[in-house]
Image (spheres, rainbow, N blue to C red):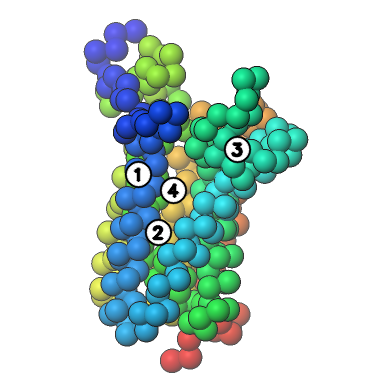
Amino acid sequence: MDTLAFITWNPNIELFSIGSLHIRYYSLCWMIGLLLAYLIVQRLYKQQRIDSKLFEPLFLYCFFGILIGARLGHCLFYQPEYFLSHPLEMILPMRHTASGWIFTGYEGLASHGGTLGLIIALWLYVRKTKVNIVRVLDNIAIATPITACFIRLGNLMNSEIVGLPTDMPWGFVFVRNGEDFARHPAQLYEALAYLVIFVIGWWLYKKYSAKVGTGFFFGFCLTTIFVFRFFVEFIKEDQVGFEQGMTLNMGQWLSIPFVILGIACMVGGKWLQRFAEKK
C-alpha cells in the first residue's frame, strides 16, 4: 500500500525524560485539559457569585475522582483477570516485570470509569461544601468536553485507541504500532467532536445561563458525548480480546446508561427537582 496517500503518524511520545522518569505528551494533554476545565469552572463560579472558598477544594475532588475512576474503570472493565491478580498495579503508576518494578505511568484509563469517578467525587464535594449538587454538575459539565478533547489528543500522540483500516485520504498510518496501512484516526474524530460539544455547550450557557442548577447542562454533556462515543465505536478496533464477536463492544454497553441518564436530566421531572435548586 502506498503510504504517501495517507498521513504517516509517528511522533515522539515523550516530551522529555530525566533518568528513568519519562514525561509523555499524553500526560501534558491531560494537564492542559484539566487546567482549562479549572479556569472555566472558576470563571463560572465567579459569574454565579459562588464563594471562592467553595471553589478551592473542587479541583482536588475532580482530579482524584477522574484519575481513580478512569484507572479502576480500565482495570475492572477491560482487564479484570490481570489486575485482580496484580492489585498494586491498579493504584501504582508502575508495572512489575522480570527485572523488577518499572515506572510506566498509568497505562490504561477508561472514560466511563472517569465519568463515574467524577460523579462520586462531586457528591463527596457537595456533602462537604453544601453547594447544590445539580448546580455543581451543570458547571462541571460545561467544562468537561474540552478536557475530553485534550485527553483524546493525548491518545492520538500515543497512537492508541485506533480506528479500523480505511482507504480515506485522511487515514493515519500508525508507524509506532508497526503498521504500514491507514486507519481511521478515531481519537481525532472524538477530539474534534468534543471540541464542538464544548463550543455548543458554552453558547447555550451564555444564552440560557438560568438553566444552570436544573441539570440541563449535565444532561446535555452526558447525552452528546456518549451518543457520539457509542457510534464512533463502530469504526474503532476492539481494545481487548473478549470484545471480538460482540454485537456491541464494552465501550458501547457502558455508554448506554450515561445516555439514558443524560436524556432524563435534559427532560427533567419531579425526580430531578428533588435535587435541583429551588427557583
Q: Which residue is mark 3?
A: 249
**Circle nearer the viewer, 4 or 1:** 1
Above or below, 188 relative to 279: above
Q: Amino acid at mark 1?
A: Cys
**Circle nearer the viewer, 4 or 2:** 2
Residue extending furthest toward the bottom: 279
Q: Secondary structure at mark 4?
A: helix
Mark 4 vs mark 1, CA separation in Å: 21 Å
The local crowd at label 1, few if under 14, some if 14 to 19, many if 20 or more residues have their Cα within 10 Å, is many
In the displayed structure image, the side of residue 199 where residue 24 appears, left or right: right
**Circle nearer the viewer, 1 or 2:** 1
Above or below, 276 relative to 222: below
Q: Which residue is mark 2?
A: 144
The local crowd at label 4, few if under 14, some if 14 to 19, many if 20 or more residues have their Cα within 10 Å, is some
Residue 278, x across and y down, in percent: 48, 91
Residue 48, x across and y down, in percent: 32, 82
Do labels 4 and 2 touch, CB within 8 Å? no
The local crowd at label 2, few if under 14, some if 14 to 19, many if 20 or more residues have their Cα within 10 Å, is many
Q: Secondary structure at mark 2?
A: helix
Residue extending furthest toward the front: 19
Residue 59, x across and y down, in percent: 43, 65
Q: Amino acid at mark 3?
A: Asn
Q: Quadrant of the C terminus?
A: bottom left
Give me the disc on residue 29: 1
| Residue drawn at (36%, 30%) of the image | 17
Above or below, 180 relative to 191: above
Above or below, 199 relative to 241: below
Q: Secondary structure at mark 3?
A: loop
Mark 2 vs mark 3, CA separation in Å: 24 Å
